[in-house]
Image (cartoon, rainbow, N blue to C red):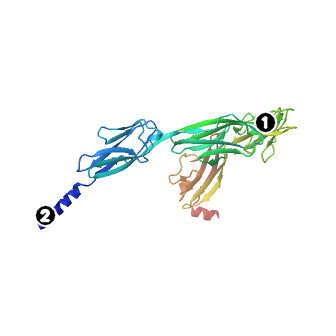
Amino acid sequence: MGSSAAVLIFCSLICSVAAQAPVVTVEPRTATIHQGESVSYRCQVKSNIQPVQLEWRRTNNQALLDNVKIGPDGSVMTVANARPGNHGQYRCVAISSAGRSFDNAVLNVKYPPKVLTPAGPLRVTTGDPVAMECSATGRPHPTVTWTRRGSTLHLVTQEINNGHTLKWPSVRPEDSGVYVCQADNNVGKSEAEVELIVMGPPGSPVASVNTEEMTVTEGQTVTMECKATGSPPPVITWSKLRAPLPWKHTVADGVLTLTDVGRQDSGQYICNATNIHGYSEAYTDMEVDTPPYATCLPDQLRLQPGNSLIIQCLAHGSHPIQFTWSRMGRGRLPAAAETTRDGKLMIANVKQSDGGTYKCVATNHIGSSEAMAKVIIKGHLLTSQRD
């Protein structure tokens, strides 16, 4: 009896080891591919009980798409010409008489955005509330922006249910135009246009400008043209937001001409068209680029050996501005000299040989300007005699 019990215990131990469920491992655990690419997963099984049946499934219980192929022995799953619908988690299940086990794998499918906007044109009446929504698909989740054709400025939107909505509490005729919704991710971009047509009362003015945004160079002569429809013909006037018009300006037949523009002339210019039925406005934003004007602070420096030298080169003008330092007559700076991107020249411990005239050149995409700083290094003896 004791011998039989020992045999049963021994058999129980052997049988429990033999009856262990298969051990499953999927490689790779995670894969990231672009739409149209292919990837394969291998299901590796360790089991001392045969046979082992392998099955591939979606973890969300959805059926495998028709572009998912399983190899002859069931161990390899290949996703060919991947589509967005292939994105998700997959499971390899191993089944034997000893039980079942599984391992999961993740497939990330990246694809470019696709935008969805209302079909245009949208015809509305002055004073109506208007909302234009743009939604976008894509992976990674795309960034969505609205702009108006002819302008690069991003318009303020409201996010509702994963859509980006342009809203007008009360539209005006000058809101008429073509609006562009663009979606971007690191795979690509997509855009769609919607035309908005705001209709006013018969005869009411509608103003428009030839350009809504311009960048010009200092010293140029600039023209801005404004046209207006309406009955009777509207009177056209120009103004500048929060500032008077530049003194060098003329207005004739709706055309504003600015002569010898400067940086101070940058800003928003407003065309106003008025008749007995009302008024309408159109806007042009002008940015005036200027070359740099450089100065050194200080422009003269008296030091003794061992002192530290710090000279700041300052420049007014359109950014970005790059600064370059040199030493007159020698070109190269002393070995101990350091410069910074914001125009600073530094020498921690000056030597007698570090004296001289240093030149800073400030450069932007329009031109350059230079400024000088004189550095005088005097010894203790010479300084005391001079005092």
When asked about the image quadrant of residue 237, the answer is: top right
Give the Cα distance between marks 1 and 2: 106 Å
Q: Position of residue 191 (x, y in %)?
A: 59, 37
Q: Nearer the viewer, residue 232 or 301?
A: 232
When asked about the image quadrant of residue 36, the answer is: top left
Which quarter shows the N terminus?
A: bottom left
Label 1 secondary element: strand
Q: Upstream in the sequence, badge 1 or badge 2?
A: 2
Q: On residue 207, which mark appears?
A: 1
Q: Judge left or right: residue 78 versus residue 172.
A: left
Q: Is residue 160 above or below residue 351?
A: above
Q: Position of residue 214 (x, y in %)?
A: 70, 38
Q: Judge left or right: residue 93 versus residue 154.
A: left
Q: Position of residue 373 (x, y in %)?
A: 63, 51
Label 2 secondary element: helix
Q: Nearer the viewer, residue 256 or 263?
A: 256
Which quarter shows the C terminus?
A: bottom right
Q: Nearer the viewer, residue 34 or 386?
A: 34
Q: Judge left or right: residue 47 versus residue 181.
A: left
Q: Nearer the viewer, residue 194 or 326?
A: 194
Q: Amino acid at mark 2?
A: Ser
User: Mark 2 = which residue?
Assistant: 4
Q: On residue 271, which mark appears?
A: none
Q: Is residue 101 above or below residue 117?
A: below
Residue 185 visible? The answer is: no
Q: Position of residue 232 (x, y in %)?
A: 87, 32
Q: Amino acid at mark 1?
A: Ala
